[in-house]
């Protein structure tokens, strides 16, 4: 298994869009995910090699939230790590299929109907009447 050194860890943080928070005896990087969760990792200065494959796997899993393959893809190719996106919550006011059908029958295009987020919005559009009288 290919193991990184400090230079590789710095390159990963740069490629994956981490922010350098501070530098003391070590560099402290952080990355805020779209979920709001903040990842943090500490990287030594110099060219210190990680010799333990288990330690590298743990750093990837627990600090960087990536696989070793994703780590090396970022280092070698400058790509960001694809991380899961938050699930979209179900709308509080779902639009019944019959209402969607009625809007379509009034001549409203499906791309416009698909932009409506609540039943209230759909009813307002329905009450405006047909698109082409």
Image (spheres, rainbow, N blue to C red):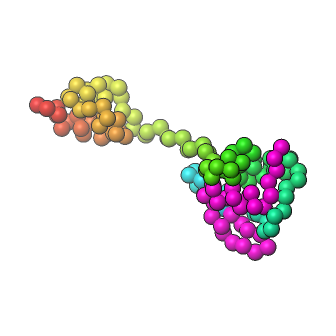
x 76%, y 75%: residue = 24
For the C terminus, the quadrant is top left
Residue 57, how many percent across, how many down? 80, 47
**Residue 83 sits in quarter:** top right
Residue 38 covered by magenta stretch: no
Residue 20 covered by magenta stretch: yes
Number of numbered discs visible in the structure rendering: 0
Depicted 101 relative to depicted 48: above or below: above
**Residue 18 sits in quarter:** bottom right
Residue 86 seen by the camera: yes
**Residue 126 sits in quarter:** top left
For the N terminus, the quadrant is top right
Residue 37 seen by the camera: no
Question: What range of the chain is rendered magenta?
Answer: 1-29
Toward the left, the furthest residue is 133
Query: With 119 as the anchor, is 48 left or right in this view?
Result: right
x 69%, y 59%: residue = 11
Residue 119, how many percent across, how many down? 33, 36
Toward the right, the furthest residue is 51
Name the one closer to the observer, 13 or 106: 13
x 63%, y 64%: residue = 19
Depicted 102 relative to depicted 13: above or below: above
x 86%, y 47%: residue = 54
Query: With 8 as the anchor, is 16 left or right in this view?
Result: left
Residue 67, how many percent across, how many down? 72, 44
Toward the bottom, the furthest residue is 24
Residue 84, how many percent across, how many down? 60, 43
Toward the front, the furthest residue is 76
């Amino acid at each position: 298994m290919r193991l990184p050194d400090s230079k590789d860890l710095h390159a990963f943080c740069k490629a994956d869009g981490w922010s350098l928070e501070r530098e003391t005896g070590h560099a402290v990087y952080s990355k805020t995910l779209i979920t709001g969760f903040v990842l943090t990792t500490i990287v030594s200065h110099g060219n210190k090699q990680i010799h333990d494959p288990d330690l590298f796997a743990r750093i990837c899993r627990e600090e960087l939230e990536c696989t070793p393959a994703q780590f090396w893809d970022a280092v070698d190719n400058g790509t960001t790590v694809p991380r899961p996106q938050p699930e979209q919550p179900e709308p509080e006011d779902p639009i019944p299929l019959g209402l969607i059908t009625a809007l379509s029958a009034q001549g409203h295009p499906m791309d416009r109907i698909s932009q409506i987020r609540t039943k209230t919005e759909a009813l307002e559009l329905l009450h405006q009447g047909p698109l082409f009288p």
